[in-house]
Image (spheres, rainbow, N blue to C red):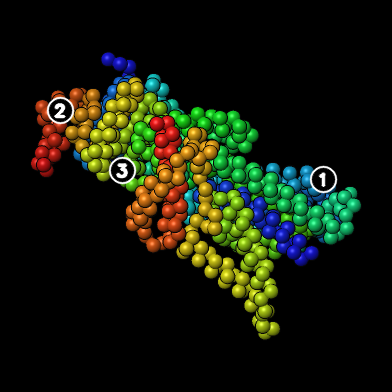
Amino acid sequence: MYWVSVFTEAGNFAILALGLDVVWGWGGDFDLMFYGYLALGSYMTFVLSIGKPTPPVEYIIGWHLPVLIAILLAIVVVVCLAAVIGAIALRNLRGIYFAVTTLGAVSALYLLVENYTPLFDGYNGVYGLINPGQSALNLTYNGYRIFFLVAVFVLLFLSYLLVQRLSRSPFGRMLRSVREDERAAAAYGRPIFFTKYRAYLFGAALAGLTGGLFAIFISAFNPSAWTPQELLVIYAAILVGGRGNPRGVILGVFVVYIGFIELTRYLPSPASRPDFGPALRQVLIGLAIILMLRFRPEGILRERPGLDTRPESAGRPPRGWVEALTGTARGAAAAPASQRAAGSSGLRSDEGATREGDASKAARRRAGQTGRAGDRE
Amino acid sequence: MSATLLEIENLTKSFGGVHAVRNCTFSIPEGQVVGLIGPNGAGKSTVVDLVSGFGRPDSGSVRFAGEPIVGKRPDVISRLGLIRTFQTPREWRHLTVMDNVLLARRRFANESLWRSLTRARRIRRDEEKDRAVVRAILERFQLAELRNELADRLSGGQKRLLEFARIAAAEARLIILDEPMGGVNPVLGARIGEAVGHFAGEGRSVIVVEHNLPFIESTCHQVVVMDLGEVIAQGPFSGLRDNPRVVDAYLGMDQSHG
């Protein structure tokens, strides 16, 4: 059951990371408010589904909605908050200014939630969402936990399909062009603010969904369940997995959560220092970020642009392709050498290798073309 | 005389106490290449920024195809059919060459977030059409082989060509080139001149901001000369040699250098 809960948590965070990657990976905005959206989504799911508060507990709304509807409404509320924050922060602020503004926003939210008890019962938080629908599904407690794990992974898969489709779409391309160079994007007719704003709301919706799932997962939510700092681990996961690549982001979350956070629990820690394990975990995550930035800044799976394949190059290899390939092989070997000379900054040690890969691919493509030309003669 | 596409009237802009542009008035006819020249600090680039929406003038008016465009955002002006470049090529570095030019095709309708998610098949069909056009353009600028490379990896000259490929793909009515010859070798320069002529041949208007006077002479139908934020002359290049103000402000300086 321990591993069920670990994977459920990682699955949840993977959905969150997919949303954050749209904002940061494609849009380029380092948003520190993002964990706040998760928290708000979680709180809203509670207060919409657990019914009236019994004194001394107090919180707003207190409806008794089915949990799925509660999550949907929570997403709407989260997107509304993101609409306000985004409208302020995305208009003119970039880089560190945007980050600081969103940090201010999440700190304000955190202090408000913690100190203003009529909202979400302050420091004590909200609780009481225990395995909603368990009796209707006729499951045991553990059976429900496994069912929930499957449900989270189905939602993760659906989120992945959605994000992947968006990534390849004209919208994804436009958003990346704004990230790469705003002024050029504007010169070619792209509204900078509105493009980023839409991406921001989309990302926040996924954060709201994650919040709703978290409500079911941990069945209680209070300020100690979320701090703005937790977001940095998600950023680390995106960085490790591959910023801008949805598959890489999911991979990164599992690597960081399972590889670092969970496996380090098994490290022996001296009786005198029970905090050794958690401390080591932080060190390992920090080390991973440094190593990734040094040796593979684009992450395990790099952002992959859609490649353009000529329609006619698909299909069986034409006759004579062996000769063509060997004929151009020499040229292909020469090309990467010159390219390597041009780009050998030494910082990205893998680049020579991938370029070689690209060049040989190009050679094969060229080989195909010359082969066909030979056919026609 | 063909119709006027761009009308600039009494355009004024100051930064602090400096008058970058003062009562600037000129117009660009449809289908003509107009050179905008003047010494450094004459206000040429400021005029380009003001016209394309990257800056807001203190006073004056700009009409594009009859429509006033002062105060509109750059992307709105661009959608009316005005494409500008910047002094250094501004490619989208971590997108492929193909994606760079595809973006310049500007099929805005398909870029809505909702449509991107729901109309995948329709979008793919539109995109296939655009890709065919873009491949032909890349062929023309000798970038076809590089279309799957990241724009980041192109050489300086190739980045210039990519800029022109994007402009060709955009099919704008007015093209403003801010120093297209910066850092360009003579062979490439000749090809850029050809491309500019080609755009004019298609009925597009072009404004060229440039210091390279032989290039201006060979490509432009007429020239606007600026100095200290003011337009000091407008007309065919050949007439400028006899204009004492122009000689004093620009050509004179050029000769003393040369």
- The single residue placed furthest to the top in the displayed view is B1
> Do the residues bearing badges 1 and 3 touch, measured as CB atoms within 8 Å?
no
Q: Camera-side residue: A298 or A276?
A: A298
- What is the chain identity of the residue bearing mark 1? A
* Circle 1 residue: A65
Q: Quadrant of the N terminus of chain A?
A: bottom right
Q: Dot 3: within a 10 Å radius of its alpha carbon, few (fewer than 14), some, or many (20 or more) residues? A: some
Circle 1 SS class = loop
Circle 3 SS class = helix
In space, the residues marked 1 and 3 are separated at their CA atoms by 63 Å
State which quadrant residue A84 falls in: top right
Q: Residue at x 69, y 50 (%)?
A: A156
Q: Dot 1: within a 10 Å radius of its alpha carbon, few (fewer than 14), some, or many (20 or more) residues? A: some
Q: Quadrant of the C terminus of chain A?
A: top left
Q: Camera-side residue: B107 or B177?
A: B107
**Rendered location of residue B204, percent (x, y):** 34, 24
Q: Is residue A6 left or right of residue B230?
A: right
Q: Earlier in the sequence, mark 2 or mark 3?
A: 3
Q: Residue at x 47, y 39 (%)?
A: A319
Question: Label 2 sits on what residue type?
Answer: Leu
* Circle 3 residue: B157
Question: Label 3 sits on what residue type?
Answer: Gly
For the residues carrying marks 2 and 3, which lies nearer the camera in this image? 3
* Circle 2 residue: B240
**Rendered location of residue A241, percent (x, y):** 57, 57
Q: Residue at x 73, y 44 (%)?
A: A72
